[in-house]
Amino acid sequence: MKYGYRTATLMAVAGLALAPALWADDDTRYSGSRDEGSSSTSSTPYTSGATTINHPGRLLASNCFQCHGTNGHGMASLAGKSASSIVEEMNEMRQKPSGTYMMYVHARGYTPTQIKLIADYLSKQQP
Amino acid sequence: MTLIEKAPNYISNILSNSVLYGKKTILQLTYGYADLAKNYGINVIQAEVTNIDPVSQQVMLSTGARLGYDRLVLSPGIQFDVIPGLETVSAQTAIPHAWQAGAQTTNLRDQLNAMPAGGLFVLTIPAAPYRCPPGPYERACVVADYLKTYKPRSKVLILDENAAITAEKNNFTKAFNSIHAGVIEYRPASTVLSIDATNRILDTNWGPIKANVINAIPDQRAGKIVTTAGLNNATNGRFAGVDMLSYESTVSGAKSIHIIGDSSATTQAKAGHIANQEGKVCADAIVRSLMGQAPDLLPVTNSSCYTPITMETASWLSAVYAYDTLSKSMKVVGGSATESTYINKDQYEEMEKWFDNLMSETFA
């Protein structure tokens, strides 16, 4: 067992909602296969499944999920979109008047490096 | 992963004002926990946590059971102080807060329905911090719009304990002074001393005020379990101090106990959208910790909401927060939250989509 946390007991006491996406990484959720590389078909170190847990853009990109769905599967779906197109769109939106569209505020909220990490993470999700 | 929740369902506070003007029902705002169990393998227990033993790392349940934990995350929302005069159940029924969606919301809706034309609706707003900063002003706006249509010549009086509008100031100023001019009267720096529930009279710093319907939102504090467990070490004992990298309690001896959402004392808004993100930062820190790694040292969160200004139009408010290493707190990127330039129907439609996505993400 590679990841010790699978044996730990976690408990959440909710009154407000807890985000459910925390433990999920697309198709390997409960497959019992979280070993690194088991579902990887790409040469990058983080493609899908367990490996995306270690992606430095994962937590940053989770800011998108309230509107764009868990791992980008929702309104104006972002999962599997090319990283360069996400970066380009974010850069364009940074130039627009911020009060005219909510995304223009979000586009300004991240550094160029952070936007690249977010885009890379989203591009590696199964569309 | 075990989820302990005292209620069988979650009733969304977000969009609950739309129940007041008949656009949504409580049922449409109700979400269950079954999909979390089914899709994510979470063990859901319906019970209340009555206490925590941080030494043996166990929680005590209302069912009498004790459960051990390695990590404990608390998200119990808020509880309300009692406004003088509203000590009894009947007084609290006569003067609802409707700040916890459900029976309180339908109670207020029914009182609005029964209100005579030309009547007075009084809304009282507590001093910040309280749940959903723009929420009370939004409520005043949609109630005003409802009254214009269904109870002509009625007025809305806002008694705000704060010195000024606490969120989305431009849009609410526009709403009070032009869209709802002549219907809404806004009085900042108001103090409610007590309320006579039987006669519907408020004793205030402006003198006695008699109303047809009173919607009094009380002062708020962290959910009960936070206080019971002694985790309420911030905001004069009202909320829980947490480390912003992990949401772990700052109370010594409370290791491995994390508090997210409205119960925690942070620089972030007390609201559902950002509580979702706090949950992710907290969970990511826990996962990394259990893997022997440090938490993300520069977390980013965001707060976003749409605000109905009339029964058909909405504005919005949005902010991205980044961790500030000097103050060890979350700070809004760019200095302050951005509110929408416009108030329109398109944004009301966007609001519905935002809400559906937020709920899908949260409840699977």
Image (tube, helix red, strand yellow):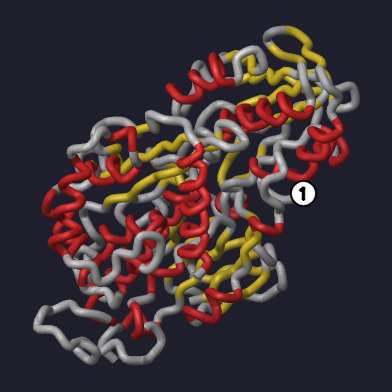
When the figure is inspected, residue B228 is found, relative to residue B348, above or below; the finding is below
Q: Quadrant of residue A85?
A: bottom left
Q: Where is residue B88 in the image (x, y as percent from the top left)?
A: 85, 37
Q: Report if residue B213 is visible in the image.
A: yes
For label 1, the crowd category at 10 Å Cα-Cα, with few meaning under 14, some 14 to 19 and many 20 or more, is few
Q: Single out the residue that lies furthest toward the front.
A: B345
- Left or right of B146? Residue A44 is left
Residue at 26 percent across and 43 percent down: it is B328
- Left or right of A45? Residue B354 is right
When the figure is inspected, residue B62 is found, relative to residue B269, above or below; the finding is below
When the figure is inspected, residue B171 is found, relative to residue B222, above or below; the finding is above
- Left or right of A79? Residue B274 is right
Q: Nearer the viewer, residue A50 or B325?
A: A50
Q: To which residue does mark 1 refer?
A: B103
Residue at 34 percent across and 78 percent down: it is A26
- Left or right of A109? Residue A43 is left
Q: Position of residue B188 (x, y in %)?
A: 56, 15
Q: In which quarter of the image is residue B89?
A: top right
Q: Nearer the viewer, residue B239 or B110?
A: B110
Q: Single out the residue that lies furthest toward the top.
A: B207
Q: What residue type is labelled 1?
A: Ala
Q: Single out the residue that lies furthest toward the left.
A: A43
Q: Position of residue B354 (x, y in %)?
A: 46, 52
Mark count? 1
